[in-house]
Amino acid sequence: MHLHWKHRELVKLISKQKSLAFVENTARLLEYESGGVLVAIENVPKGFALIYYRGKNYQRPRNLLDKSKALKRSIAMQRHELPPSHYSSGKKNMMASMEIYQRILRETKRRRKGRREWKVEIPNDVMEEIVMRLPVRSIMRFQAVSKHWESMIKTRDFGARHMAHQRSKDPKLMLVSYGLSHIRFEQRDFETTSLQESLRLKTEKIEGAAMAISECCDGLVCYYRLTQAVEVVNPATEKSLVPLPLAKFQQLHKDHPDRDMEQEIEAITDEDDGPDLVPFIFFTRFGFGKDSLTGRYKIVWLYNIYPATLNKKKKTRCEVFDLEEWRWRFVTTRPLDHHQILSDQRPSFANGSLYWLTGDEQGYPSTLTKLIVLDIHTEMFQVTSTPPFISPDASGDKIALCNLDGRLCISELQGDCTQEFWWRVEECDKWERIFSVDLISTSSWFGGIASQPLTPLAISRDNNKVVLSLTYHENLVDFDLDPDSTVYHLYYSGYYGFAVPYFPSLSLVDF
């Protein structure tokens, strides 16, 4: 058992004893002697399965029985279980075996002096609460305990409660980097940035094609290229879905890689009649979110038609992929009217909706920027004005959108190189100012740049600090949220493609 516990948290023993009473006595004896925790006794075809957990902060004891003593004890216990008719000496041998057995028990108690033994019956709901607080990889191993535990862990209710418990703590920091034929996920501690877990996956090798990574949603991350299928992965469980089918515009770019060519093809929407020219687009990123009512995960790809002269009535298209329906479908963009999205932006998901900033006809930043909002459940668009604290003539490249601690956060880079951050409090339906940053003070860590807005990654509840990042720059900076503090520190330095706050989850366990 201890050799097994050296590398694993659980050990399963098979007992061929016929009597359940003997099995329980043996199980308690092993629990007492090994120092582990008896998790369950399961009836299996070969007899009874005894499941033991090694406990937290496990250390292998030094005073273990040697092989000869362990063998003598095992023989004595087996003789004790058999009736007298199985012995040649009958009752005399039985009494001798009993005496040996009792001597072994006394010796064990003497060696384990000071330890207490008690019998505890743990209710199922309490056991679920205990398992829910374990690390994800430990929970994945616990599925091997029994079919009951496996089915319990795979339920959506258990996954949702585990996710809620994770969100009650500070997030992890997920750094995602990639090469020509691989992608690497690094999970780091939020306080110390020390590496905790890593996952490296092989990808299709495509020369000159940039890879994009989505925001994290319930521990799930998507990665893709313009002409390569989207893949969804859970880095904590190392589970991933099979590659998604190509979206319609992905297939279009794969078939016609030259953006400037114009040829007639059949319309790819259900709203246009007759042939249409190939609508090539600037590279845009999709939004990834979860329907708060149905629990379904959806990928939403909103993109501009380029050039805009190809279709004067319709300037944007939107494709939605529901992971349960497993197909791309078009969603009407009529409520957007003449508005187009700002190119090369990552939409933000918060409170059941996705948010984009508007741009001009070619996707470049423009004044009079507005917000495009999509309700994930109803799949309906609406265009709203930016909050009143954003300048009416603010350019889209000076406004930053993100999800901060589960809320929509918006900020504007002012002319004096200060940036104020606000987030939306849904409970009272109002905007609340969080903090402000002086980009002159942070520019030394970002190559002297003070003309691009920063993005807050996460807030630490324990240390009352926020971590800030700048697109396409490797350093991360933390800032103390104390109102009297103006001190910035280098939080992390090193190559990474994308940094995102991350909560390990059990998502995709039931897929």
Image (spheres, rainbow, N blue to C red):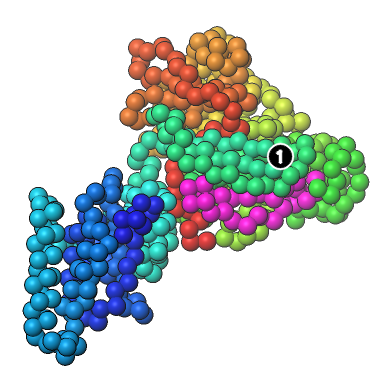
| Residue 217 position in % (x across, y down) | 51, 45
Left or right: where 71 falls relative to 260: left
Write the residue at 52% across / 38% down.
186
Q: Which residue is mark 1?
A: 180
User: Can you see residue 131?
Assistant: yes
Is residue 343 found inside the magenta-colored segment of the image? no
- 443 or 6, which lies in front? 6
The local crowd at label 1, few if under 14, some if 14 to 19, many if 20 or more residues have their Cα within 10 Å, is some
Q: Front-most of 201 and 260?
A: 201
Label total for image: 1
Residue 238 lies in magenta, yes or no? Answer: yes
Residue plotted at (90% across, 49% down): 264
Residue at left offset 52%, top offset 51%? 238
Q: Nearer the viewer, residue 408 or 14?
A: 14
The structure residue drawn at horizontal position 69% and vertical position 24%, both measured from the top left corner, is 366
Q: Residue furthest bottom?
A: 85
**Amino acid type, label 1:** Leu
Q: Is residue 255 left or right of residue 211?
A: right
Q: Nearer the viewer, residue 133 or 288?
A: 133
Q: Quadrant of residue 326?
A: bottom right
Q: Which residues are magenta?
A: 227-253
Q: Is residue 99 above or below residue 406?
A: below
State the image coordinates of residue 269 (x, y, percent, origin top left).
Answer: 76, 53
Q: Is residue 388 visible?
A: no
Q: Is residue 102 above or below residue 232?
A: below
Going by the image, does 193 lie left or right of 127?
A: right
Residue 149: x %, y % from top left: 36, 64
Q: Position of residue 306 (x, y in %)?
A: 80, 37
Q: Secondary structure at mark 1?
A: loop
